[in-house]
Amino acid sequence: MSLGFLFAMSLPALVAALFLLAVVERFVRNKKKGTPMATAGIGELGATFEAGKRDELEYRKEERQLRDDEGDHAPPRSRVDLDGGTAVLKVPAQRQPG
């Protein structure tokens, strides 16, 4: 085996490749959404050596998948106009038992 092959299969070569990928992505990616490949690779590399990192990555993945809804999911009844200084409140009528 040659020395170049052994270096290519080593951990420092992986770190160097991830660093080069991060530099290339920095200049090629222009405000694209999503996780850059180098960031994901470095995170996975860190999860290999740190016990709690895998749990953190799984937690982040789950958080991205959950919806973050605000409100009570009821139809909008009230409206507040901050610029105009007005608020419209519509109170539903009370139902009579019967």
Image (spheres, helix red, strand yellow):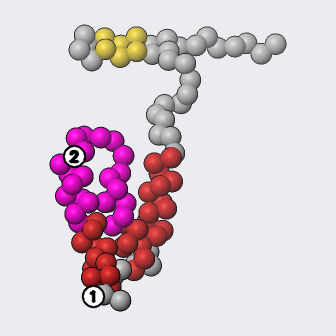
Residue displayed at 27% across by 82% down: 4
The answer to whether 77 is drawn above or below residue 33 in the figure is: above
Q: Is residue 43 magenta?
A: no
In which quadrant of the rendered image does the C terminus lie?
top right
Position of 34 with respect to 61 (left or right) is left
- Rendered image quadrant of residue 94: top right
27 or 33: nearer the viewer: 27
The answer to whether 60 is drawn above or below residue 31 in the figure is: below
Residue displayed at 25% across by 40% down: 31
For label 1, the crowd category at 10 Å Cα-Cα, with few meaning under 14, some 14 to 19 and many 20 or more, is few
Q: Which residues are magenta?
A: 19-42
Q: Position of residue 21 (x, y in %)?
A: 26, 60
Q: Position of residue 17 (x, y in %)?
A: 27, 68
Q: Position of residue 83 (x, y in %)?
A: 23, 14
Residue displayed at 49% across by 11% down: 90
92 or 50: nearer the viewer: 50
- Rendered image quadrant of residue 7: bottom left
- Rendered image quadrant of residue 14: bottom left
Q: Which mark is residue 86?
A: none
For label 2, the crowd category at 10 Å Cα-Cα, with few meaning under 14, some 14 to 19 and many 20 or more, is few
Q: Earlier in the sequence, mark 1 or mark 2?
A: 1
Q: Which mark is residue 3?
A: 1
- Is label 1 in a helix, a strand or a loop? helix
Disc 2 target residue = 28
Q: Is residue 53 visible?
A: no
Three-letter amino acid code at disc 2?
A: Val
